[in-house]
Amino acid sequence: MLLWLRNYRAQWLSGDLSAGFIVVLMMVPQGMAYAVVAGLPPIIGLYASILPALAYALFGSSRVQSVGPMAITSLMTATSLAALAPSGSDLYVAMAAQMALISGLVLLLCGLLRLGFLAHFLSRPVLSGFTTGAALLIGASQFKALMGDSLTTLNLPGASIGLLSLLALWLAKERLAPLLGKLGLSLKRAAMLSKLAPVLVLAVATLSVWQLDLQHAGVVVLGPVAQGLPSLGLPSLDFAQLQSLLSSSLLIAFIVFLSSQSAAVTLAQKRGERINSNSELLGLGAANLASAFSGSFAVTGSISRSAVNYAAGANTPLASVISACLMALLLCVPTGWLALLPLPALAASIIIAVLGMLDFDTPRQAWRFDRSDAVAWLATLAGVLLLGVESGVIIGVMLSLGSLIWRASQPHIAVLGRIAGSEHFRNIKRHTAQTHPQILLLRIDSGMFFGNAELISDRVLESLQAETQHVVLVLSAVNLIDTSALYSLAELNRNLLNRSIKLHLAEVKGPLMDRLLQSDLLLKPLSGQVFLSAAVALDSLSAELQDGKVQGLHGGE
């Protein structure tokens, strides 16, 4: 905690100051936009950018992570609360803060229990399908506001502002960085400045409304924005409300961690640093508790803002502290100018922001490499679009775990032969290798557990030939044998013995051998031996077949 501050260097300050200033410019439109996505008053998005950033700087492990509102968590908040309270009402706001409180407590508890490994329970294709579906839902939800807040009667000034803002933001996203590069800026600076285009576009749109008095022409504007800092205090706790929010809050906590971890690890790799998953849980937990304490909603690490923070020269979490302090100062000055910000332009900024979440490269690569992953991507996407965000998350997690179990339950088992003139053994289906007609060597390329034990035994029996007298299981790739697999091996040993076939083991790893020596499988000896290597097994058994003399080595590798 605060290790970065204890080791702070003076030469880092300029980079942290510039990054803090630039990121706060990005946080103003993003914070308000994501609050709108969540169904909350826009000012709450700005509140969510102050205390959470300070709390994460205190406990988190990433030096350049920018924590605050994000599109996915905003959408999940909106879908969770849609049926529980009117959007934007005091009850709605209180329940959003309660969700942040529950999520924060869950993340904090997971950090204390060192459950950082949970970050690996959602595969890349499933996470991609989820974010792509969420992006499509968010974009579709903003189309009405983009067209002037009506899909039936066209408000020409409002629709014009929305569509022109959309075009300007798209051109900035696609063309501005190369153009700035041609003007002499470095690619890093050009990319960073292009990400600040929403600030300029929203400023121009607001100025147009003011100069042309477009709010009286039907253009929907943001309206009065409260001045000052948020009131501090825990949200009111109603047990019935908390019960209704529990499952949604757990899912949000899971997505908060996955999103933030992804951004943090990506940037840490660029900086040659490491991310501590358990510290991330603590930092995100503290950030969400701080968000709840300031009456805001669930927050997480933002990939886009974190990238800008990094590109702007951030060296330590002081950059985020500076951004939070600047945001607090902005809220303490008159905020009347925000009242004329046109919602069609804000909708355009949301649509452009979520375009970056669309990912069609992952399913394309998955289709070429592993079609089950491509199916998982499509199923998760369909789940989000057809059944809702929460169902999409559940489908994604279940598919990830199901895919893991299915793969583990279908282990690769290779019949081995000896490469001529060497002690190397390879799969006879892939290499020209010599085999012995009476000795069957099988390599198990997976841990052996209750999900695949019977299948392995069946595959061994199916591989037997009429002349087989010895079966050698090569366990060089096996790190685990559970109790079910142990019983299955004992049963296989008896079945083979009934056929006058001996079962042997080879290349057993030391830790696994230690456990086997305490089991009935070896206490009540195998029909065969345990050999140091496949080569020793083949040589010894070949010699036995020739003269009945066995030279086995009973010990681990």
Image: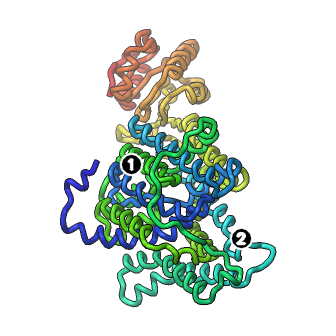
Residue at the limit of the structure toward the top, as seen here: 524
Q: Residue 79 appears at what percent x and percent y? A: 66, 52
Instruction: Please give the residue where the numbered disc 2 appears in the rendered image.
Output: 144
Q: Quadrant of residue 381?
A: bottom right
For the C terminus, which image quadrant? top left
What x and y, as percent, mark residue 306? 41, 63
289 up-or-down from 170: above or below = above
Residue 119 visible in the snapshot: yes
Q: Position of residue 413 (x, y in %)?
A: 53, 35
What residue is pinned by disc 1? Answer: 283
| Residue lying at the far right of the rendered structure | 152
Whether residue 112 is situated above or below residue 532 in the rendered picture: below
The tag earlier along the polypeptide, 1 or 2, is 2
Task: Say which residue appears at 57% left-offset and 79% top-offset.
Answer: 170
Above-or-below relation of 83 to 191: above
378 or 421, nearer to the observer: 378
Q: Tell me if 127 is positioned left or right of 215 in this view.
A: left
Q: CA distance from mark 1 to mark 2?
A: 37 Å
Q: Hey, what amino acid is under mark 1?
A: Gly
Which secondary structure lies at badge 1?
helix
